[in-house]
Image: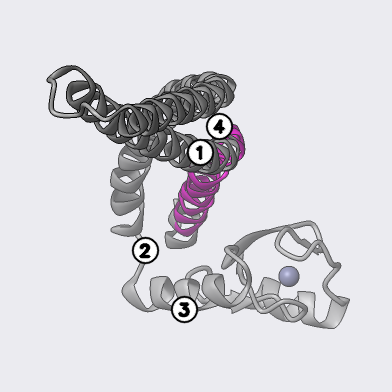
Amino acid sequence: MGSLDALIDVQTLDTRADQLRHRRDALPQLATLAQEAATRAEVEQRADVARGRLHELRQRQKGLEDEAALVEDKAAEIDRKLYDGSVVAHKELEAFQEDHRQLKARQADIEDQALEVMEAAEPIDAEVSALAAEVAQADERIAALTAEVESARGEIDAEAAVIASEREQAAANVPADVLEAYEATRSRMGGIGAARLVGNRCEGCHLEIPSAELEAVRKAADDAVVTCPECGRILVR
Ligand SMILES: [Zn+2]
């Protein structure tokens, strides 16, 4: 086996490593994962808006309840005065009774408003819960997909490690200058730096080599590095 046959082995292993890298970056789960993440973000945003509205309503309800309690305290104070004997004048009693009646009416009115706000908050509370459940479900799907990606990548990485070690062994049989020329060509030519010459055709660019140039290629010494006149890749004869 000539030194250039080992170069073809290097090329084959490099191509397989490139394919693995591509597979690693383009796992089908990654697209689903991106979709799930976008859905989660959208639901989370809706949940944030609903939580904001719920918080606002709860604050309003609390404000009304506090106000009702304040009015109730005032009414109770008047009630005390009405019955502790400190007010005796009929007109004054009547005025206090009217105040008390008005305060109780106001309290009832505020309590009604608080109840309305509480009722308005109920469907929003349910919406917040439903959206939180949706986010939790999305999280589960994201976790499962992430685990799938990690597992698939683990397998790919193990395969890549085997290929890297095989590549190292193959490369040891290729002269350093040839390997260097190969690597430069490979990076310039989209991954393929060396190709077989099959008949009069370069397997790298699939073009036929003109007969005059083919003659020169055939006459070159076995261990000479010859490149394809069409694409510049190292030809392995
Ligand atoms: Zn070529």
Label 2 vs 3, first from the N-terminus? 2
As shown in the figure, which amino acid type bears the numbered disc 1? Glu
Label 4 vs 2, first from the N-terminus? 4
Write down the residue under mark 2.
Answer: 174
Foreground residue, 183 or 1?
183
Write down the residue under mark 1.
Answer: 44
Q: Which of marks 4 and 3 is in front?
A: 4
Foreground residue, 139 or 66?
66
Q: Which residue is drawn at 56% across and 24% down?
A: 116
Asked whether residue 77 is drawn in magenta, I would say no
Write down the residue under mark 3.
Answer: 181
As shown in the figure, which amino acid type bears the numbered disc 2? Val
Asked whether the residues under the numbered discs 2 and 3 touch, taking CB atoms below 8 Å apart as contact, a structural biologist would say no
Foreground residue, 94 or 98?
94
Q: Residue at x 37, y 41 (%)?
A: 160
Label 2 vs 1, first from the N-terminus? 1
As shown in the figure, which amino acid type bears the numbered disc 4? Gln
Q: Estimate the x, y position of residue 173 in percent, counting from the top left.
A: 33, 58
The magenta span reads 7-35
Is the shortest distance between ligand 1 and the CB of mark 1 under 8 Å?
A: no
Q: Which of marks 1 and 4 is in front?
A: 1
Q: Estimate the x, y position of residue 228 in percent, counting from the top left.
A: 70, 75
Q: Is mark 3 on a helix, strand or loop?
A: helix
Q: In this view, does 218 lie to the left or right of 116?
A: right
